[in-house]
Structure formats: C-alpha cells, structure tokens
Image (spheres, helix red, strand yellow):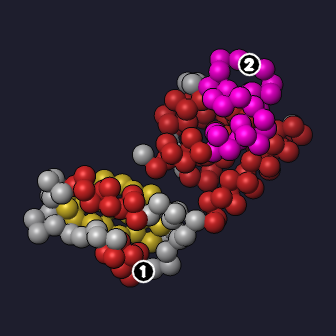
Amino acid sequence: MEQELNFKTLCKMTTNMLELPEGSLAYKSRREELQIPRMVVSVVSKMVDNTHFDIISSGINRDRTLINYYMKMHKSNYRSFPKYRDMFNKIYNAYNEIQGAKRTFIDKYHLREFLRQAGVSHSARPQTTIRVRSGKVKVDIKVSYRDFSNQLDLCKLALTDCNYNINIL
C-alpha cells in the first residue's frame, strides 16, 4: 500500500519536474523523452523504497522483468549515458529530499508512544499483527480480526507525515 503511494508520488514528481503530461510514463511510446524517465523512476523507486517489481511494472505499464533489466543496466547507463546520469541525479536528489523531510523515529519507545497517543492499541485477544517500521525501528501491534481495519487506519493516519512502512504478519 505505502509502496504504491510512494511510487505514484515519485512518478508525479518526475512528470512535473520534466514537464511531461501526467501519466505519460505509462504510455506505450518508446520515445527517448519518456523511456529515460521511465528507467530512472524504476531504479530510484527500487533503490530508495525497495518497491516490489510488480508495483513498479503496473505503475509504468511494463513487464516486471523489464524493471530487473533497468536495475541490472543502471551502473552501465550511469557511467556511459550522460542524459540518463543527469536525469537520475536530478530525480534521485529531489526524491531523497522529500523522503528526508519526513519524520523518522529513533527508537521503539518514541514510535510506540507516538502510536499510542494517536489511539493505536493492542487487542485483548490478538489474532494477527501489524508491523510498523520507521527507519531502523519496528513496532508490532497485536490486533484481533475484528479491530484490524480500525487499527490499521489509525496507524496510517498517525504516520501521514512520517517515513514508514507497514507489514501485516
């Protein structure tokens, strides 16, 4: 969920910075002015957010094996293809600046307390777990199936301006 939102944000930021039509990265065109940004967005998303290949491929309307190829060719493209290198540096730095501006927690106590103050709590009879990561810190919230969606929504709402990732265990 969060990876999809981050990838959409990255695509929108890229099209705005390069003054391309919105959604143009998903066009079937092989024109260089669309192909290079498509490659860059794929690599940046994988490097920064570790976005799954399936999410990237559906976002740019390409086969997921092509994303693997972009990753494999990144080092070579960066070294020998000036247009790619310049665009990669521009997009990578801008996206990292956005991600760096988001709050990250330094220890479990602060993250747990932040979530508790937002109304997130453990269930009396837990059946599943929501794992919240922010930076190198992770907190598990044990919830029942009945309270699951409510607690998940509270987590997302509380962490809106934070750098986080949520997994369901």
Instruction: Examine the rendering and report whether any part of residue 160 can be seen.
Output: yes
Q: Position of residue 105 (x, y in %)?
A: 49, 74
Which sits in the foreground, 36 or 155? 155
Q: Tell me which corner region of the image, top left, top right, bottom left or bottom right, holds residue 80.
A: top right
Spot occupied by residue 59 in the image (x, y as percentages of width and height): 55, 32
Q: Quadrant of residue 82?
A: top right
Q: Is residue 169 left or right of residue 74?
A: left
Q: How many numbered badges does the structure rendering display? A: 2
Q: Residues within 10 Å of mark 1 (few under 14, many from 20)?
A: few
- Whichever of labels 2 and 1 marks the residue nearer the N terminus, that label is 2
- Examine the rendered structure and indicate whether residue 8 appears above or below residue 164: above
Judging by the rendered image, the residue that carries numbered circle 2 is 30
Is residue 34 in the magenta section? yes
Magenta range is: 10-36
Residue at the spot 65% in from the left edge and 58% down from the top edge: 98
Residue type, label 2: Arg
Residue where numbered disc 1 is placed? 110
Report the amino acid beneath label 1: His
Element under disc 2: loop
Measuring from the top left, give residue 8's x and y in whole percent: 57, 41
Of badges 2 and 1, the one in the foreground is: 1
